[in-house]
């Protein structure tokens, strides 16, 4: 148990929409904020949003956002007394957590020991097995390559290569044949090293058509641990979540209680403190298995906030200050919340990133519409970082109402200058199988294979032409055949 130590100034060791989102909560709480930025992010929204900002290095993340020494120098220079890691980058790095604490600062997250125990997927698997939490069969690498291949063949293809040190779909590859195992391992290792500064991977049995459901955890320094219900994260592309919601269409009160208590038991096993997420995979018979525990705030946390009426970042800060949890169990859930991740990428061209300057941005609004956005008009979407532009979140009194609101909000979203996945998202949530709640991690491969964008109306093109100098509308009721980065592809229904 520890006493209460109020936090006065927080350095946000991140960028983009999550940095902006954290800074907003800090402002509401009367806590000053410090942004860190690379040379590529000098004009970024999170820099403008913060009370202070410090340059920490060149554009590559390995020379800026992953440099523990430079982040701590920035904290010392600005007089910050706490650090919030956001998600990604150093958020699940135990050495970073230890370095922050060692510098006399408050780390707004779990202690290094908990990150080591749970942040690494291999460690969390061992812990889960020890405490009776079901896990998917897996094989770790062996220097004896023949023995390693034999163990993988015995487990049975297809298998999934996973990075031990991270998440977000990075360092993951599905392997269907033994001859692909070695080259896919090398690709996964390189991606993991680049993203998480670790090339440790393992091979897990790949479940076909499973659902991906996670439970939000909160734990304080006084021994209290609760779960805040589930989030359905089954709509994924290349193992990257793109649509999330709560409650899950699959969930029953009995299954929720059983899975929630399993998540709590895992957190209690390591004396976990702060916010975390326990992720499960569920097969078609409703058997569930531990995937991992993310020892940080999740990208999709806003859907939980909307149905429960709370601010998870504020709760993280309260916990870090030493305050007890405000609840003994999850607050009452109301309605349904849905989140779509908007990326600067070209779905019609292999989902290639679409970096460039955002010439103009029109954000959706209205009752129960929230847009956690990391850019604004004039901002550059850099090729050095994840191309996510924003997270669009809506609430409705039930799932059909939330889906209808999301459709409207997506149609109202307009971005000129870069290509986005807006229309792709519209076709996902507009699909009949989505409406029925028939979700699984292979949903987009099954239902949207070979997807092509719709053409937009002449009215939308005319308005875009008025906004974007040099653009031209063409006769015939549609925009011209579009090259990559064509603004007509991302103009919303506001133009009609």
Image (cartoon, rainbow, N blue to C red):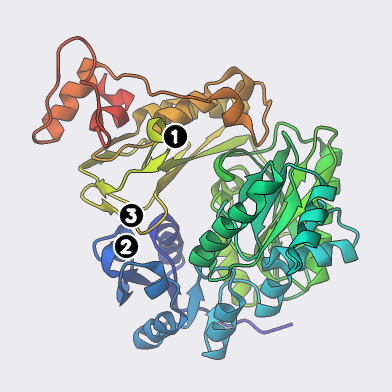
Q: Which residue in the structure is indicated by mark 1? A: 367
Per the model, the C-alpha gap separating discs 1 and 2 is: 24 Å
Q: Secondary structure at mark 3?
A: loop
Q: Reading the chain from its start, which is encountered first: label 3 or label 1?
A: 1
Residue 350 position in % (x across, y down): 42, 36
* Image quarter in which the C terminus is found: top left
What is the quadrant of residue 91 in the picture? bottom right
Whether residue 358 appears in this view of the structure is: yes
Q: Secondary structure at mark 2?
A: helix
Q: Residue at x 34, y 61 (%)?
A: 46
Q: Is residue 37 left or right of residue 427?
A: left
State yes or no: discs 1 and 2 in contact (Cβ < 8 Å): no
What is the crowding at mark 3: few (fewer than 14 residues within 10 Å), some, or many (at least 20)?
some
Q: Which residue in the structure is indicated by mark 2? A: 49
| Rendered view: 382 above or below 240 | below
Q: Residue at x 35, y 33 (%)?
A: 413
State yes or no: discs 3 and 2 in contact (Cβ < 8 Å): no
Per the model, the C-alpha gap separating discs 3 and 2 is: 22 Å
| Residue at the bottom extreme of this rendering | 103
Q: Reading the chain from its start, which is encountered first: label 3 or label 2?
A: 2
Q: Closest to the observer: 70 or 306?
A: 70
Q: Which residue in the structure is indicated by mark 3? A: 383
| Rendered view: 126 above or below 5 | above
| Rendered view: 415 above or below 185 | above
Per the model, the C-alpha gap separating discs 3 and 1 is: 34 Å
Q: Residue at x 75, y 52 (%)?
A: 204
Q: Is residue 463 left or right of residue 303?
A: left
């Amino acid at each position: 148990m520890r006493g209460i130590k109020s936090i006065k100034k927080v350095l946000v060791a991140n960028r983009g929409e999550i940095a902006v989102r954290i800074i907003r909560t800090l402002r509401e709480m009367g806590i000053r904020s410090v942004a860190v930025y690379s040379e590529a992010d000098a004009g970024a929204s999170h820099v403008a949003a913060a009370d202070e900002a410090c340059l920490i290095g060149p554009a590559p993340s390995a020379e800026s956002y992953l440099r523990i020494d430079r982040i701590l120098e920035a904290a010392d220079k600005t007089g910050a007394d706490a650090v919030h890691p956001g998600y990604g980058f150093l958020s699940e790095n135990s050495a970073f957590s230890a370095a922050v604490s060692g510098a006399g600062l408050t780390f707004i997250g779990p202690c290094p020991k908990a990150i080591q125990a749970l942040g690494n997927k291999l460690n969390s698997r061992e812990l889960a097995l020890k405490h009776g939490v079901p896990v998917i069969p897996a094989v770790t690498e062996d220097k004896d390559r023949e023995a390693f291949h034999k163990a993988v063949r015995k487990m049975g293809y297809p298998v999934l290569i996973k990075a031990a040190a991270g998440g977000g779909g990075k360092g993951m590859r599905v392997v269907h044949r033994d001859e692909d195992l070695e080259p896919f391992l090398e690709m996964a290792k390189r991606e993991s090293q680049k993203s998480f500064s670790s090339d440790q991977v393992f091979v897990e049995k790949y479940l076909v058509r499973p659902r991906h459901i996670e439970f939000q955890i909160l734990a304080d320094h006084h021994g209290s641990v609760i779960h805040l219900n589930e989030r359905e994260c089954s709509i994924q592309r290349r193992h990257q979540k793109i649509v999330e919601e709560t409650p899950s269409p699959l969930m029953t009160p009995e299954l929720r209680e059983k899975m929630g208590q399993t998540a709590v038991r895992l957190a209690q096993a390591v004396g976990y403190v702060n916010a975390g997420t326990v992720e499960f995979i569920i097969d078609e018979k409703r058997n569930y298995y531990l995937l991992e525990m993310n020892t940080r705030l999740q990208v999709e946390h806003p859907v939980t906030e909307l149905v429960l009426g709370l601010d998870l970042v504020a709760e993280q800060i309260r916990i870090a200050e030493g305050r007890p949890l405000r609840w003994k169990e999850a607050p009452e859930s109301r309605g349904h919340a849905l989140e779509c991740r908007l990326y600067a990428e070209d779905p019609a061209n292999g989902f290639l990133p679409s970096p460039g300057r955002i010439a103009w941005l029109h954000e959706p609004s209205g009752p129960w519409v929230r847009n956690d956005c990391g850019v604004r008009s004039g901002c550059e979407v850099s090729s050095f970082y994840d191309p996510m532009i924003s997270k669009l979140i809506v609430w409705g009194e039930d799932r059909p109402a939330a889906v209808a609101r999301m459709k409207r909000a997506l149609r109202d979203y307009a971005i000129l200058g870069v290509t986005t996945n807006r229309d792709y998202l519209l076709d996902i949530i507009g699909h009949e199988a989505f409406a029925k709640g028939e979700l699984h991690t292979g949903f987009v491969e099954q239902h949207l294979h070979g997807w092509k964008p719709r053409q937009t109306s002449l009215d939308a093109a005319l308005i875009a032409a008025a906004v974007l100098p040099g653009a031209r509308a063409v006769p015939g009721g549609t925009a011209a055949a579009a090259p990559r980065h064509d603004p007509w592809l991302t103009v919303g229904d506001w133009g009609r």
